Amino acid sequence: MSPEFIIASIVTIIGLTTPILLAGLGELVTEKSGVLNLGVEGMMLMGAICGFAATAFTFNPWLGVIGAAAGGALSSMLFAILVLQLNSNQVATGLALSIFGTGLSSLIGQSFTGRIVPQFGSIFPDVLAKDPIWKLLFGYSPLVYFALIMVPLTAWFLKSTRAGLILRAVGENDHSAHSIGYSVTGVRYAAIAFGGAMAGIGGAYFSMVITPMWAERMTAGRGWIALALVVFAGWRTGRLLAGAYFFGFLMWLELFAKANGFGNTMPFLQAIPSQFWAAMPYIMTVVALTLISSRGNVGASAPACLGKPFLPST
Amino acid sequence: MQTPPRLDLSGITKRFPGVLANDQVSFAVQPGEIHALLGENGAGKSTLVKMIYGIMQPDAGEIRWNGERITIQNPKAARKLGIGMVFQHFSLFEAMTVLENIALGMDANIPARDLEAKIVAVMQQYGLKLEPHRIVSTLSVGERQRIEIVRALLLKPNLLIMDEPTSVLTPQEVEQLFVVLRQLASEGCSILYISHKLHEIKALCHTATILRGGKLVDTCDPAVETSRSMAEKMIGGSLKDIQRGEGRALGTAKLTVQSLSVAKDGPFGIALKDIGFSVKAGEIFGIAGVAGNGQNALLLALSGETPSTSPEAIQIDGTSVAPLTAKQRRLAGMASVPEERNGHAAVPDFSLSDNAILTARDRMGMVSGGMVNAHSARTYAGEVIAAFSVKATGPAAMADSLSGGNLQKFIMGREIMQKPQVLVVSQPTWGVDAGAAAAIHQALVDLAATGSAIVVISQDLDELLSLCDTLAVINEGRLSKPMPVAGANIEEIGLLMGGVHGDPNAPTHISAEVAHAY
């Protein structure tokens, strides 16, 4: 394997990792507040189309990202009102949000099909960003750096700030948090909105970075992987980063297999159809979840109020 | 000039749909006074303190604080006035540290290091021991309560409200708590102490206010009153003692448990280790212990919900029932009542007669040829309702339309009226008022008199001491040697309850005052 090939592979893996890392971080914060939002896929698609549309109107990808965050957050608010105000079932409402986001994004996307929007420039000088070696560090879209900065920032927020402490408290024991005098519903609205915004930016990575074009369902199920990633990571930010790269690697295997790469290097893998590699991340999701839950770790680390509606007794 | 009372309530009234929770309640708490608030479940104690702590607003009446008329908008405003509260059900976060839990209870954002220093200072002042960086789920109930107390003390309260603080403590832990409360009171802090344990109120409190049905019945001096006279004011009638038949003789061993071990069922579960005891026909066997020491696991193992590992571990009349399922054990003559009423002992969305079918269908002949005989189910549910004076509209009433105490009476009645050979019950009178508790106790004694073996698992030591013939203590999943209740030593029982899940720092001796109170 040539160094060029390895560098290209790493760049690809980082690209594949970024959207699920962004959406996963958002979902982690949402779940830490005790809300299970299964609508990540729908919010990512809403972010993808809103980011694309905002860029198409303003010709400014930075405003596009804001549009994507707003699109994701707004669609998450629909979920939040149903779940927090009307106490609807979180699982069913989240699934509905996924379906709704998929449909609405397709509808909005009708008029944008075939258009191309301006892309982010490099934020580092071309000497570094285009250098065949240094591009490993400097050659990415700003969203990649944003995602990587958000990892320690989220960890710090949850661990060391008072707001983060309150958010975890609400997810751990909503009734106690309420009796101490915190607004359970308010905290959860904020957490859901953050999750929506992050999923939206993650979705925009598809329509604004990977291909500067809109296509229906272009997130291709990555929202579900992001959800599994949170469980896989045991609700810990550090493990979420590691898990995101692991899934990124699995997705890269598919691309590699489709490009007929195994034929040259590892002929014995040639016989395996590329669909198998495409299914790998999903198979690994199931395997990882089964392994983790059979060891009883999920019960210990999951926020105690995850998925339960909050009904104050007084 | 006389100093005004710390807290002065006059004419406090609170109405809920269909209920007058507080009706013209007036009393005063002086600075440095430990004031008991007594009453049965539903007497309005909780509603009243919720209004003092700002969780609810009174519909009428006024609250004076140090002589000034005030309205307490929310708990934050209450804390600002210097009112602290320790809840009966701790508002703690299991997966977080002691320090994080206390930080959450503070209104100001204090840096973690400063807060820790303050906590250490308060703990030294009052002789409370806690490790600030321990995770709450690893702490004993007594230690958890200490977190709540430290949290309240950090606010330098002028009035501390304690809601049933001793219901889950060992006698030694109660003793330690009293020392702290007396020290607080001597420093001028008023304490409003809610309890229905009369001996504690006699030992601790200066004044007692008794509520019944939302109305203030009496404000008295507990040192002058007897436990019985206060109890009768609480229930508004004379208290019935348990009637036992003359010359009871215990039969041969009915239920025998030997070398029963069960692995723990989750990260916070408790494993049962080598449990062995035997209950004779006509005997009531009590299992005491602080919550979370394996009581639940033991009930599940006895009822058949958790399968047994060893085939001989549980025997009825010498025949092993260990390999049998819960349904098969019921057919073999065993009945059980778990601690949790809603969702475990009864289905909240089912009618009472449907709930009767769930455990009584085989023994009471409600099923023939796979078909449910709804008529016999209704009749049986009706009999239970009548025999146990359950307040319900009838067999068709939904289980969740009943109050906790009434549902408990129905569930206990449903099992007792099947006349099981062996009955295993957990917390038979949890949340049940004194009158109903006496009725349930009487029914258990009457069942035992017919030759059934009864196991009562309870955290309420008083209940076990008055009800049982034999007593054992469960701690960390291990059962102590059984001892006859007649010669039981409270100090020894308290020590057995301690162990790991109890408080390791608790004193080994309790004062004559507390021991005498039992």
Image (cartoon, coloured by chain):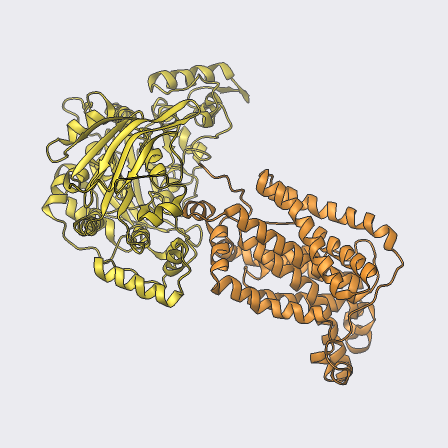
Chain colours: A orange, B yellow
Drawn side of residue A110 relative to residue A230, left or right: right
Q: Is residue A276 or residue B141 the one in the foreground?
A: B141
Looking at the rendering, in which quadrant would you find the C terminus of chain B? Answer: top left
Please give the name of the residue rendered at 20% of the width and 25% of the height, measured from the top-left corner: B233
Count of numbered marks: 0
User: Above or below — where is A30 with respect to B350?
Assistant: below
User: Above or below — where is B16 with respect to A281?
Assistant: above
Q: Is residue B139 or residue A281 the one in the foreground?
A: B139
- Residue A190: % across, % down: 58, 52
- Residue B175: % across, % down: 18, 49
> Can the viewer see residue B330 in this picture?
yes
- Residue B46: % across, % down: 34, 35
Location of residue B197 (image quadrant): top left
- Residue B34: % across, % down: 20, 42
Drawn side of residue B11 relative to residue A273, left or right: left
> Can the viewer see residue A35 in this picture?
no
User: Above or below — where is B53 with respect to A197?
Assistant: above
- In the displayed orientation, state which residue is furthest to the front: B1
User: Above or below — where is B60 with respect to A297?
Assistant: above
Looking at the rendering, in which quadrant would you find the N terminus of chain B? Answer: top left
Please give the name of the residue rendered at 18% of the width and 52% of the height, measured from the top-left corner: B187
Q: Is residue A20 or residue B301 the one in the foreground?
A: A20
Drawn side of residue A121 relative to residue A39, left or right: right
Q: Is residue B238 or residue B349 the one in the foreground?
A: B238
Location of residue B383 (image quadrant): top left
- In the displayed orientation, state which residue is furthest to the right: A114
Drawn side of residue B444 relative to residue A259, left or right: left
